[in-house]
């Protein structure tokens, strides 16, 4: 079985995948958390793709107690209000960790969507699949923007934010969009 990876999404080289030791969750719990996020988001339909064998009765759930596949990548696709979306992760060496990362990403985006802030588009606009020849570049998760673990302490987040601001602030020759991305990442991480 292989992962239904969107062709416009880059893959992480096998040698660059790391083992994530910060997630204290089973594969089953990670899927249950993801399913709950998709329910809260109110999607029309969703599908999880991994290289594991999935249950025929519930195709979003891999069978339990399988060996780790050669390709630990995870792709989540869903439809909502007539649009198709996808997010994917293969940064970690285990399916469970990539799945948990996708679930946390959806949770963070869903929280941002609930803020009473007006923006130019939905928070999930960067996950919308292209129609035709357009390509999509997914925004990295807030912890990745700051270079910290997903469950980093507030002090670690603040320290990482100060370091990233030195690099990205427009007054220091940085890029305005990167600077704003660092600010948003800090706000999301401290709001959890």
Image: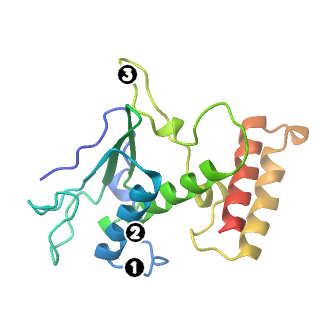
Q: Which residue is mark 3?
A: 131
Asked whether residue 192 appears in the rendered view, the answer is yes
Asked whether residue 175 appears in the rendered view, the answer is no
Q: Secondary structure at mark 1?
A: loop
Q: CA distance from mark 3 to mark 1?
A: 35 Å
Tags 3 and 1 touching, CB below 8 Å: no
2 or 3: mark nearer the eye: 2
Quadrant assignment, res 6: top left
Q: Which residue is mark 1?
A: 25
Residue at 30% x, 65% y is 95
Quadrant assignment, res 78: top left
Q: Residues within 10 Å of mark 3 (few under 14, many from 20)?
A: few
* Image location (x, y in percent) of residue 13: 36, 50
Residue at 39% x, 60% y is 17
Name the outermost residue toward the bottom.
Answer: 24
Q: Does 98 appear above or below 140?
A: below
Question: Which callout, 2 or 1, points at the residue further toward the start of the chain?
Answer: 1
Question: Which callout, 2 or 3, points at the residue further toward the start of the chain?
Answer: 2
Tags 2 and 3 touching, CB below 8 Å: no
Q: Secondary structure at mark 2?
A: helix
Name the outermost residue toward the left.
Answer: 56
Q: CA distance from mark 2 to mark 1?
A: 10 Å
Q: Which residue is mark 2?
A: 33
Q: Nearer the viewer, residue 187 or 116?
A: 116
Question: Which callout, 3 or 1, points at the residue further toward the start of the chain?
Answer: 1
């Amino acid at each position: 079985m292989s992962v239904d990876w969107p062709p416009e999404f880059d893959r992480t080289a096998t040698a660059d995948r790391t083992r994530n030791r910060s997630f204290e969750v089973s594969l089953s719990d990670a899927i249950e958390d993801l399913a709950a996020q998709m329910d809260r988001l109110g999607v029309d339909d969703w599908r999880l793709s991994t290289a594991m064998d999935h249950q025929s009765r519930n195709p979003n759930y891999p069978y339990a107690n399988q060996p780790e596949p050669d390709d630990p990548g995870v792709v989540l696709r869903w439809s909502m209000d007539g649009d198709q979306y996808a997010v994917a992760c293969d940064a970690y060496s285990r399916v469970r960790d990539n799945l948990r990362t996708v679930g946390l990403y959806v949770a963070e985006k869903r929280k941002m969507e609930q803020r009473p802030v007006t923006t130019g588009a939905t928070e999930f606009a960067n996950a919308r699949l292209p129609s035709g020849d357009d390509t999509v570049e997914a925004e990295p998760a807030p912890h990745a923007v700051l270079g910290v673990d997903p469950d980093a302490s507030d002090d670690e987040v603040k320290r990482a934010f100060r370091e990233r601001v030195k690099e990205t602030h427009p007054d220091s020759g940085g890029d305005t969009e990167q600077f704003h991305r660092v600010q948003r990442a800090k706000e999301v991480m401290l709001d959890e």
